[in-house]
Image (cartoon, grey):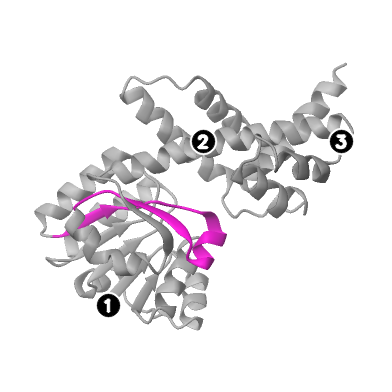
């Protein structure tokens, strides 16, 4: 079986490597050729164009940052659906919108292909350790067909119903990630103002009802180390919250806290924090507090 993996970024590269480790023949494509070289050094195969891969691969997987990238990759004139073959299984691990998933699935079906929207959660650590949560929408028969592949990428793998449902679950996850990120950032920045050591706060709250995986991630992997190179950039979290807000608006649902968090992150991006890890909201809140102090 020949696999194609398109998008060898912070998540995609370790995922593709895990498929190579599992013994699959995996061809990789990435916009940055340095990532392709890193993949080849791990035993992956490179050198085929997107069109060639679309014509040859049995299963094509994508993990891309933005919805426009996903749409172009699948539905563009040089993309997968236009150049693929009947019977292919297409899996998108990206976070897009439910509507885009339905659009891609419809085009794939007309071309005789099968599509699953299967976004993932677990961050770069989960991608590296093959412990991701994977939430897949689409045909259960196709899900069962590709499950052996997915089992080399994650430990918590769910079929959640029709096309788009995987993305709905992922966007709800991202809504809570955004809110938890803001809550943890505000708490840590306020602790600083109160002269309370953040490591002590983390030890206590980790054994209290305020504990969350996001708080633990942000503090132990980034804030405590004063290192904010992105595992998952604030720009991408904002993109996801915009998608959440549109999903809510389109379906008549209120997001009073989620909408506020989306606007706060939008402002943080505008002030230069977008390329930092999403835990960088702590830095933004600290800066806000300093500015407030300066106005007193």
Q: Position of residue 27 (x, y in %)?
A: 35, 76
Write down the region rendered in magenta.
Answer: 113-139
Residue contact at pointers 2 and 1, CB within 8 angstroms: no
Q: If you read the primary sequence from the N terminus, does the residue marked by circle 2 or circle 1 appear first?
A: 1
- At label 2, counting other C-alpha atoms closer than 10 Å, the crowd grade (few under 14, some 14-19, many 20 or more) is some
Q: Which mark is residue 176?
A: 2
Q: Which mark is residue 196?
A: 3
On the rendered image, what quadrant is the C terminus found in? top right
Residue 131 magenta: yes
Q: Residue at x 45, y 67 (%)?
A: 15
User: Which is in the foreground here, disc 1 or disc 3?
Assistant: 3
Q: Which residue is mark 1?
A: 2
Where disc 2 sits, the SS reads helix
The answer to which image quadrant residue 116 occupies is bottom left
Residue placed furthest toward the top: 296
- At label 1, counting other C-alpha atoms closer than 10 Å, the crowd grade (few under 14, some 14-19, many 20 or more) is few
């Amino acid at each position: 079986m020949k696999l194609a993996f398109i998008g060898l970024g912070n998540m995609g590269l370790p995922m593709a490597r895990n498929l190579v480790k599992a013994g699959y023949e995996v061809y990789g494509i990435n916009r940055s050729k340095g990532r392709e070289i890193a993949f080849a050094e791990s035993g992956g195969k490179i050198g085929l164009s997107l069109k060639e891969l679309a014509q040859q691969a049995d299963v094509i997987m994508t993990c891309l940052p933005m919805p426009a990238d996903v749409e172009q990759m699948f539905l563009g004139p040089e993309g997968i659906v236009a150049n693929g073959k009947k019977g292919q299984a297409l899996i998108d691990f990206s976070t897009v919108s439910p509507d885009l998933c339905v659009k891609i699935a419809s085009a794939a079906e007309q071309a005789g292909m099968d599509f699953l929207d299967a976004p993932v959660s677990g961050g770069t650590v989960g991608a590296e350790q093959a412990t991701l949560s994977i939430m897949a929408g689409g045909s259960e028969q196709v899900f069962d067909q590709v499950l052996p592949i997915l089992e080399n990428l994650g430990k918590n793998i769910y079929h959640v119903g029709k096309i788009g449902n995987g993305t709905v679950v992922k966007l709800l996850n991202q809504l809570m990630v955004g809110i938890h990120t803001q809550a943890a950032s505000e708490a840590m920045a306020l602790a600083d103002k109160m002269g309370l050591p953040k490591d002590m706060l983390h030890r206590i709250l980790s054994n209290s009802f305020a504990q969350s995986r996001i708080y633990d991630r942000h503090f132990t992997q980034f804030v405590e180390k004063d290192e904010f190179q992105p595992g998952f950039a604030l720009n991408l979290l904002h993109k996801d919250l915009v998608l959440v807000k549109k999903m809510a608006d389109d379906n008549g649902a209120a997001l009073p806290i989620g909408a506020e968090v989306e606007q706060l992150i939008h402002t943080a991006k505008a002030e230069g924090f977008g390329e930092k890890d999403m835990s960088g909201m702590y830095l933004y809140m600290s800066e806000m507090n300093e500015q407030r102090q300066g106005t007193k």
